[in-house]
């Protein structure tokens, strides 16, 4: 399962970003957004990189104005963390890697007064990107951001928008990335602060999993940023199978 997910991450990022193989690292770069979560490297399985490879990786990110950073399943490359730390990298976090497979998904009800829909119109797609940015404390999206989501949806990404029935106010959203090899990542689940702790995130997770499984996906995975998220995802049928290491070069 771990190798399947790491393979998916390599394939998915390669289709969306500029990539460069640097020694035993697949480096990925987002050309329009310097968000560290959209620019990171993945080591090869069982990699034992040299310090020269790590320095070349650092240079590749810095020359593009990006923070040198990695995300990967630790047990698939156990020797990498030590060499990174010796080169000045600092652990950002160890996130639970969680998966759900049919028929283990659980139905979490949609809160009263909330509706879930799959965005189709330009206004709905813009609302999806806008509410995700608001939920994550980011600036308002551009027209190009909305267009990128539209293009991604056309390629197979699944997006779900949560909004208030009575007013049409958007309160949350999430996506499943384009399925590959019957695998998808559920990501970007965000709910605006005034609607948190009402069951919106759980309902979004449930709907995304259902839509993914309806397309033939047999493994949905995600990473929980904190314990509250992990509890929500467990209620939706996910279980923890390992950890994803987030590690980046220290700014000091």
Image (spheres, grey):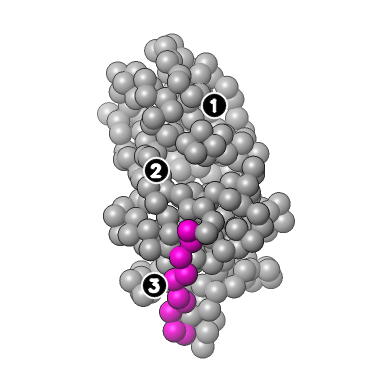
Q: Nearer the viewer, mark 2 or mark 1?
A: 2
Q: Answer with the quarter of the image where residue 229 lies.
A: bottom left
19 left or right of 120 in image: left
With respect to residue 152, does 161 lie above or below? below
Q: Which of 28 and 158 is in front in this view?
A: 158
The residue singled out by tag 2 in the image is: 241
Instruction: Decide if residue 69 is in sight here.
Output: no
Q: Is residue 54 highlighted in magenta?
A: no
The answer to whether the residue labelled 3 contacts the one labelled 1, judged by CB atoms less than 8 Å apart, is no
Where residue 245 is drawn, which disc sits there?
none
Q: Answer with the quarter of the image where residue 96 lies.
A: top left
Q: Nearer the viewer, residue 142 or 250?
A: 250
Marks 2 and 3, how far apart at CA: 24 Å
Q: Give me the residue at 54% from left, 37% from top.
A: 4
The answer to whether the residue labelled 2 contacts the one labelled 1, judged by CB atoms less than 8 Å apart, is no
Q: Earlier in the sequence, mark 3 or mark 1?
A: 1
Q: Give me the residue at 47% from left, 85% from top.
A: 113
Q: Is mark 2 on a helix, strand or loop?
A: strand
249 left or right of 112 in image: left
How dense is the environment of label 3, judged by Cα within 10 Å: few (below 14), some, or many (20 and up)? some
Q: Position of residue 128 (x, y in %)?
A: 56, 65
Task: Give the extent of the magenta segment.
Answer: 104-113
Marks 3 and 1, how far apart at CA: 37 Å
Marks 2 and 1, how far apart at CA: 23 Å
Q: Is mark 1 on a helix, strand or loop?
A: strand
Q: What element carries label 3?
A: loop
The residue singled out by tag 3 in the image is: 199
With respect to residue 203, does 10 lie above or below? above
Q: Give me the residue at 44% from left, 34% from top.
A: 72
The residue singled out by tag 1 in the image is: 26
In this view, the residue farthest toward the front is 103
Q: Position of residue 205 (x, y in %)?
A: 48, 63
């Amino acid at each position: 399962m771990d190798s399947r997910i790491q393979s998916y991450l390599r394939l998915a990022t390669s289709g969306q970003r500029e990539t460069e193989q640097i020694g035993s690292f697949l480096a990925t770069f987002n050309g329009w957004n310097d968000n560290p979560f959209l620019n990171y490297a993945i080591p090869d399985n069982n990699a034992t990189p040299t310090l020269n490879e790590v320095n070349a990786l650092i240079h590749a990110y810095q020359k593009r104005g990006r923070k040198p950073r990695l995300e990967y399943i630790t047990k698939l490359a156990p020797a990498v963390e030590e060499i990174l730390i010796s080169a000045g990298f600092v652990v950002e976090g160890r996130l639970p890697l969680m998966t759900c497979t049919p028929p283990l998904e659980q139905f979490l009800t949609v809160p009263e007064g909330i509706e879930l829909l799959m965005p189709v119109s330009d206004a709905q797609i813009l609302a999806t990107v806008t509410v995700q940015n608001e939920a994550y404390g980011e600036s308002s999206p551009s027209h190009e951001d909305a267009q990128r989501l539209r293009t991604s949806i056309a390629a197979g990404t699944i997006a779900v928008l949560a909004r208030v029935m009575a007013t049409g106010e958007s309160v949350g959203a999430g996506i499943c990335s384009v399925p590959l090899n019957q695998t998808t990542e559920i990501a970007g689940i965000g709910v605006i602060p005034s609607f948190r702790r009402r069951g919106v995130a759980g309902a979004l997770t449930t709907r995304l999993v259902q839509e993914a499984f309806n397309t033939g996906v047999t493994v949905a995975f995600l990473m929980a940023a904190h314990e509250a998220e992990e509890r929500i995802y467990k209620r939706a049928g996910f279980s923890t199978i390992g950890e994803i290491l987030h590690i980046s070069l220290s700014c000091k």
